[in-house]
Image: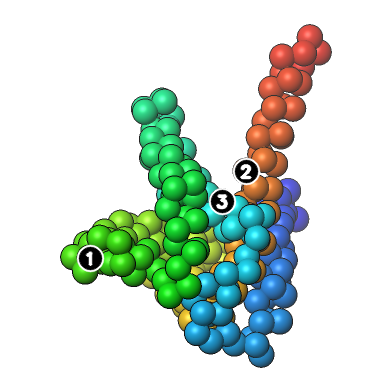
Amino acid sequence: RAPGRCSHGTEQTVPTIWTILAAGLVLAVVLPGVSRRPTGRGFFLSRRTAGPVTLAASLSATCLGASATIGMVGRAYRLGWPAFWWLGAGALGLVLLGLVWGPRMRADAGVRTLPQWAATVYGSPARVLSALLIAIMWIAVIAAQWVATATVMKALFGLSLGTGIVASAGVVSAYTAWGGQPSVLRTDRLQVLLISAAILTPMLFLGGLKAKIASPGGD
């Protein structure tokens, strides 16, 4: 057997195994909630029972998505510190939201969404404007998520980009439509662990490799 062919097969098999394990973990998190479909406030707000750790994990999983990990890496390499504001501006907005507006929103039991709260404070035009802003801004973000997921599936399984987009969008849309906010929070906790591991592992490896090269005996 040619060594190159064996090595190529190993390179293809290892990522596939890890992908299957990750998919199994996601299913293990999602399936327990299938038989307990929430309704009303439980569907939209998880009955307001999510604690700080769960909310922090959910926000981290949302912010550390494809636009931050794939798109902004190259942009930061080219632009330097100005690229910080892609996430930095959002982080400042979240701080203001949590410290100023968040407590007021949670105090209003009848409010489920940001546009709904905007209407109670600033009137109906604010509800329409905020809903449009959220929809327009998130179209690009969600599109980046689907494309990034499809790119990974193409590299691992050879799926076309279109098939990967449909498959990933279908899975996420299905468990979100069925389980609502509780389902999203459960999967976000797992996703932030997987994303953190995927980011930190190469950094640790490259750091060790750099130290080895810099050592007197390094090649």
Q: How many numbered circles does the render carry?
A: 3
Q: Amino acid at mark 3?
A: Ser
Q: In the image, which disc is placed on residue 123?
A: 1
Residue 26 placement (x, y as % from top left): 66, 70
Say few, some or many: other residues with alpha carbon within 10 Å of mark 3 (under 14 / 14 to 19 / 20 or more): some
Residue 209 placement (x, y as % from top left): 72, 27
Q: Amino acid at mark 1?
A: Gly
Above or below 87: residue 66? below
Q: Spatial distance from mark 2 to mark 1, Cα to Cα?
A: 43 Å
Residue 17 placement (x, y as % from top left): 71, 63
Q: Which residue is mark 2?
A: 199
SS under mark 2: helix
Q: Look at the numbered discs 3 and 2 and tell me whether their residues touch, using CB distance below 8 Å.
A: no
Above or below 189: residue 197? above
Q: Residue at x 73, y 20 (%)?
A: 211
Above or below 200: residue 18? below
Q: Spatial distance from mark 3 to mark 2, Cα to Cα?
A: 13 Å
Q: Residue at x 79, y 9 (%)?
A: 216
Q: Which residue is mark 3?
A: 60
User: Disc 3 vs disc 1: which is toward the camera?
Assistant: 1
SS under mark 1: loop
Say few, some or many: other residues with alpha carbon within 10 Å of mark 2 (under 14 / 14 to 19 / 20 or more): few
- The mark that comes first in sequence, 2 or 1, is 1
Q: In the image, which disc is placed on residue 163?
A: none
Say few, some or many: other residues with alpha carbon within 10 Å of mark 1 (under 14 / 14 to 19 / 20 or more): few
Q: Amino acid at mark 2?
A: Ile
